C-alpha cells in the first residue's frame, strides 16, 4: 500500500486536527506544529451539514458531538423589517432521511476541543505549540520543514493547514496578504435563558435585507443562540481582524431592522466585529511534497455555511489519498522526476487529492459569493417587491438545486480515480 508513513501538519485548527486524526487512524505517524502558544478557537457557531457530519462520524466523534451540538428542526428565511417567514428547508429527521447524516449546529470551541482531545489521545505528545513553520522543502523522497527557531523536521508529506493568513500559501505561491471584501460580520452568542420563548425556537434563521443579512441558530444543546450580522463596510479600520465592539455600534449598523433583531443584540454577550477576507483562487495547492488544505487552499465567504465542512472534507479525502493509493497508482500518474517509485507514489497521491477537490471547492466558493447579492438584494428594501423576490429565489426547487449537491457529497466513499 501507500509509502506515506509520516506527515507533518502546519496548523492546529479544524482542518489541521481533522487531518491529523484521520491520518493517525490510518496508521500514519503525524506531527502537528502550531505557532500559537495557547491553543483555543475564536468564533462562535458552525453549521455542520451532512457532507461534514459524515466525516465526523467516520472519525468516531458522533456520540461526543451529539452531547454538545444542537440538531435544529428547520431553517427559515425572514424579511429584515417585517419579520415575515418563509421555509428554507427541513432539518432534523428530514436531513437524516434524505442525506443519511445529521445537520449539526455546534460551537466552534466545542468542535475544536473534541478534535484536539481525540488526536492527543491517539498520538500523545505529537501536537507542538509555539512552533512557527518558516519553510518546507521537498528533498527527493522526503520533505524538510524548518521552524523559525531553526528546528528541523522531516516527513513524507507536509500539510499546510494554517488558515486564511497561510504563510505557506504566501511564500510558495507568491501571494500577498488576504484582502478585505467590504463585508464585516458582527458575531456573538446569546444565552437562550435571556430570551423570550418565541426567540428560542430550535430553527436556523436567515434574515435577509438590503445591504446586509443576519443568521441565527441554536448551539450547545439549545442553551446558546449564535447570532451573526453581516453588513457592508467600505473599508476595515480595526487594528486586528477581530475586535470587541459595543451593542450600540451593532444597533447603528442595522437601522430599521425588525425588533427581534435588536432584542437579540441587546441580549448578546460582547459583540465582536470580524472582517471577511478573501483571496483569489489558486490553480493548484501542491508544491512537491507539500499541500494546502482548508482556508489556506480555498478561503470562502460564509454564505453557504460550508467553510468548516470543506475543511473536514479535505481532511478525510487527503488521508484517504495518502493511504489508499498504492505505489502502482502513484507510479502511473506521477510526473516524470528523478525519484524513487515510493516518492512518485506520494507525489501522485497529493496530485490526485488536489484534482479531486479543486472543482468542488471552486464551485462552493462561487456559490457563497453568489449569495452575497441574493441575501443583500435591493429588491428586499420594499415589502411590495420583497415577497415576490424571496418566493422566487427561495422556491423549493431552486433551494434543492443550490444545496442538495453539497449535502449529498460523501468523501468517505468517493472513488479515488479521476473522472474521465
Image (cartoon, rainbow, N blue to C red):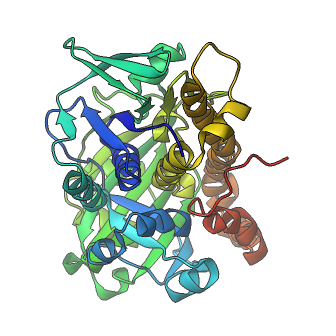
Marks counted in the figure total: 0
Rendered view: 140 above or below 378 = above
Residue 321 visible here: yes
Q: Is residue 19 left or right of residue 370?
A: left
Q: Where does the image place residue 225, in percent across and percent down from the top left?
A: 31, 70
Rendered view: 131 above or below 94 = above
Q: Where does the image place residue 284, in percent across and percent down from the top left?
A: 63, 28
Residue 252 visible here: no
- Depth check, front residue: 95 or 327: 327
- Depth check, front residue: 363 or 285: 285
Residue at the spot 26% in from the left edge and 47% down from the top edge: 42
- Depth check, front residue: 194 or 307: 307
Q: Where does the image place residue 402, in percent across and percent down from the top left?
A: 71, 63
Residue at the spot 57% in from the left edge and 56% down from the top edge: 304
- In the image, farthest residue toward the right: 420
- Depth check, front residue: 357 or 210: 357
Q: Where does the image place residue 17, in percent across and percent down from the top left?
A: 33, 47
Residue at the spot 39% in from the left edge and 66% down from the top edge: 261
Rendered view: 362 above or below 226 = above
Quadrant of the rendered structure where residue 195 is? bottom left
Residue at the spot 73% in from the left edge and 33% down from the top edge: 332
Rendered view: 46 above or below 28 = below
Amino acid at each position: 500500500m501507500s509509502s506515506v508513513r509520516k506527515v507533518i501538519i502546519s496548523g492546529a485548527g479544524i482542518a489541521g486536527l481533522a487531518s491529523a486524526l484521520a491520518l493517525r487512524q490510518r496508521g500514519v505517524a503525524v506531527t502537528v506544529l502550531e505557532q500559537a502558544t495557547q491553543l483555543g478557537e475564536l468564533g462562535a457557531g458552525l453549521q455542520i451539514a451532512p457532507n461534514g457530519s459524515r466525516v465526523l462520524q467516520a472519525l468516531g466523534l458522533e456520540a461526543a458531538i451529539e452531547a454538545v451540538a444542537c440538531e435544529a428542526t428547520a431553517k427559515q428565511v425572514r424579511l429584515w423589517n417585517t419579520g415575515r417567514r418563509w421555509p428554507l428547508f427541513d432539518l432534523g429527521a428530514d436531513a437524516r432521511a434524505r442525506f443519511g447524516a445529521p445537520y449539526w449546529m455546534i460551537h466552534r470551541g466545542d468542535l475544536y476541543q473534541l478534535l484536539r482531545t481525540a488526536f492527543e489521545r491517539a498520538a500523545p505528545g505529537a501536537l507542538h505549540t509555539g512552533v512557527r513553520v518558516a519553510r518546507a522543502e521537498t528533498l527527493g523522497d522526503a520533505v524538510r520543514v524548518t521552524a523559525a527557531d531553526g528546528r528541523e523536521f522531516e516527513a513524507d508529506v507536509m500539510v499546510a493547514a494554517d488558515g486564511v493568513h497561510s504563510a505557506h500559501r504566501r511564500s510558495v505561491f507568491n501571494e500577498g496578504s488576504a484582502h478585505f471584501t467590504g463585508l464585516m460580520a458582527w458575531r456573538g452568542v446569546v444565552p437562550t435563558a435571556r430570551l423570550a420563548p418565541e426567540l428560542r425556537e430550535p430553527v436556523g434563521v436567515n434574515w435577509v435585507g438590503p445591504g446586509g443579512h443576519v443568521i441565527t441558530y441554536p448551539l450547545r444543546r439549545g442553551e446558546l443562540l449564535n447570532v451573526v450580522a453581516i453588513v457592508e463596510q467600505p473599508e476595515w479600520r480595526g487594528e486586528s481582524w477581530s475586535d470587541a465592539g459595543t451593542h450600540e455600534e451593532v444597533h447603528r449598523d442595522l437601522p430599521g431592522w425588525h425588533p427581534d433583531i435588536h432584542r437579540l443584540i441587546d441580549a448578546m454577550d460582547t459583540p465582536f466585529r470580524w472582517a471577511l477576507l478573501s483571496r483569489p483562487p489558486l490553480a493548484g495547492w501542491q508544491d512537491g511534497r507539500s499541500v494546502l488544505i482548508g482556508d489556506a487552499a480555498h478561503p470562502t465567504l460564509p454564505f453557504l455555511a460550508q467553510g468548516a465542512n470543506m475543511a473536514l472534507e479535505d481532511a478525510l479525502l487527503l488521508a484517504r489519498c495518502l493511504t489508499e493509493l498504492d505505489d502502482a497508482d502513484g507510479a502511473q500518474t506521477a510526473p516524470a522526476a528523478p525519484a524513487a517509485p515510493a516518492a512518485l507514489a506520494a507525489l501522485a497521491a497529493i496530485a490526485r487529492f488536489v484534482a479531486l477537490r479543486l472543482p468542488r471547492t471552486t464551485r462552493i466558493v462561487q456559490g457563497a459569493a453568489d449569495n452575497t447579492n441574493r441575501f443583500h438584494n435591493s429588491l428586499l428594501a420594499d415589502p411590495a417587491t420583497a415577497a415576490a423576490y424571496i418566493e422566487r429565489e427561495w422556491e423549493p426547487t431552486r433551494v434543492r438545486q443550490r444545496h442538495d449537491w453539497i449535502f449529498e457529497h460523501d468523501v468517505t466513499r468517493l472513488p479515488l480515480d479521476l473522472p474521465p
